[in-house]
Structures are given as C-alpha cells and as structure tokens.
Image: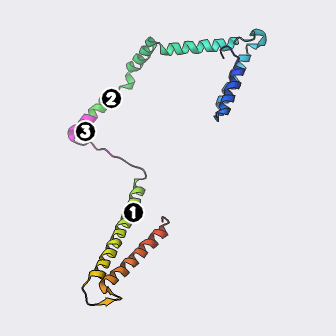
C-alpha cells in the first residue's frame, strides 16, 4: 500500500472496518475525508500517478520530525528539567510539610472517609440480618416444638401430640406467615 493514494487507503480501511463490524465515530470519518481532500491539494496535474501529493509528503515529513523531536533524549531531559525548576510548583510544599509535622507532633491527625451510598447498604444489610434472625428463630421454634410434641412426657395430648409442642407449631406458623407477608409487601420475594 506504500505510495497508494489516500482515497484508496481510505476505501480499503473503511471496507475492512465494515467487514469487522467496527463503528467509526463521525470525527474519524471526517478526518479520513479531510486527509483525502488535503491530498487533492496537490492536484492531478502536480502529482504524477502513483506518487504521493506534495501536501501529503510535507505533512508526513513534519509528523516524522515532530515524533523524532519528542523522542530525542536531550529534549526530554530539557523539558523535565524545565518543569523541575519551576519554583511556583513547589512553593507550598514547605508550609504543608510544616503543618503536617505540627499536627503529627500534637497528635491531631484525623482521617475522615465519606462513603456514598453506605447508609442505603447498611439499611439493606440490617433488614437482611433481621429477616435471617427471624427465620432462624422460627426454625428453632419448629424444631423445639416437634421434639416436645413427640418426646414430651406431659399428660395432656391432642391427636397424639403434646399440647406444648402443638402450641409451638402454631406460634411458628403464625410467625412464619408474618415473615412471608413482610417479605411480599417489601417486593423482594
């Protein structure tokens, strides 16, 4: 593709993007059009067929020079040194360090965190924990009632089950129904 006109490169690139399912932003498509228009600035009478237009060559040379300049180690060192020498960037550091050391010496350092949405999370966890404890209480009541109903030695029995066990079962059923109604009313079943 070296030496191919930008119009052809643009067509091939857009076709490859279309086949790959790539959606290009309108700015990129406009950039392609601008490059093709810039290449046309050389005109067909100035540019022989198969050669790049003078505007394209000049732009490529300028871009290459810019890249070489920014990669030049001497330029990088000069730029870094220039930023380090700027006094206003570090003017506040001595006062800030002094204030920090004073606060450390006095023991007055406080770190405050503010979490957004933490109150909502805590309330949801609180509701979850309450429901879980309530369900465990109901489960324990059912288990205890069944043990009392079957193995209880009390003299009062109803349908072959001890009365205390039957009362525990009824209480567990009422509490379980109340828990179920609460969950359904909250809309999180």
Note whether 157 is above or below 95 in the view shown: below
**Alpha-carbon span between mark 3 and mark 2:** 15 Å
Please name the residue that numbered disc 3 is placed on: 103
Return the mark for residue 93: 2
Q: Position of residue 120 (x, y in %)?
A: 42, 57
Secondary element under disc 3, as helix, strand or loop, is: helix
- Pointers 3 and 2 in contact (CB under 8 A)? no
Q: What residue sits 36% from the left and 25% below the top?
A: 90
Q: Are marks 1 and 2 in contact (CB under 8 Å)?
A: no
Indicate yes or no whether the magenta region holds residue 114: yes
User: Residue 20 versus residue 110: which sits nearer the camera?
Assistant: 20
Q: Determine if the magenta segment contains residue 77.
A: no
Residue for point 34% across, 89% down: 158
Question: Which label was assigned to residue 128?
Answer: 1
> Which residue is nearer to you in this view: 130 or 17?
17
Asked whether, in this view, residue 99 is left or right of residue 53, the answer is left
Q: Position of residue 4 (x, y in %)?
A: 69, 16
Q: Which residues are magenta?
A: 99-116
Q: Residue at x 37, y 62 (%)?
A: 126
Q: Is residue 86 left or right of residue 156?
A: right
- Neighbourhood count class around disc 2 (C-alpha, 10 Å): few under 14, some 14–19, many 20 upward: few
167 or 114: nearer the viewer: 167
Left or right: 169, with 184 as reference point: left
Closest to the camera, between mark 1 and mark 2, is 1
Q: Dot 1: few (<14), some (14–19), or many (≥20) neighbours within 10 Å?
A: few
Picture coordinates of residue 99 (x, y %)? 28, 35
């Amino acid at each position: 593709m070296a030496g191919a006109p930008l119009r052809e490169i643009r067509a091939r690139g857009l076709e490859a993007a279309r086949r790959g399912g790539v959606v290009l932003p309108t700015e990129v498509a406009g950039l392609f059009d601008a490059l093709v228009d810039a290449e046309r600035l050389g005109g067909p009478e100035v540019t022989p067929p198969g050669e790049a237009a003078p505007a394209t060559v000049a732009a490529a040379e300028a871009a290459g020079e810019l890249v070489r300049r920014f990669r030049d180690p001497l330029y990088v060192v000069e730029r870094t040194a220039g930023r380090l020498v700027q006094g206003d960037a570090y003017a506040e550091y001595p006062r800030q360090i002094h204030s920090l050391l004073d606060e450390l010496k006095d023991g007055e350092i406080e770190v405050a965190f503010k979490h957004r949405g933490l109150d909502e999370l805590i309330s949801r966890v609180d509701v979850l924990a309450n429901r879980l404890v309530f369900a465990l209480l109901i489960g324990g009541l059912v288990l205890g009632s069944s043990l009392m109903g079957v193995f209880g030695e009390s003299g009062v029995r109803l349908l072959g089950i001890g009365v205390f066990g039957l009362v525990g079962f009824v209480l567990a059923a009422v509490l379980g129904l109340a828990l179920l109604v609460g969950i359904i009313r909250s809309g999180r079943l």
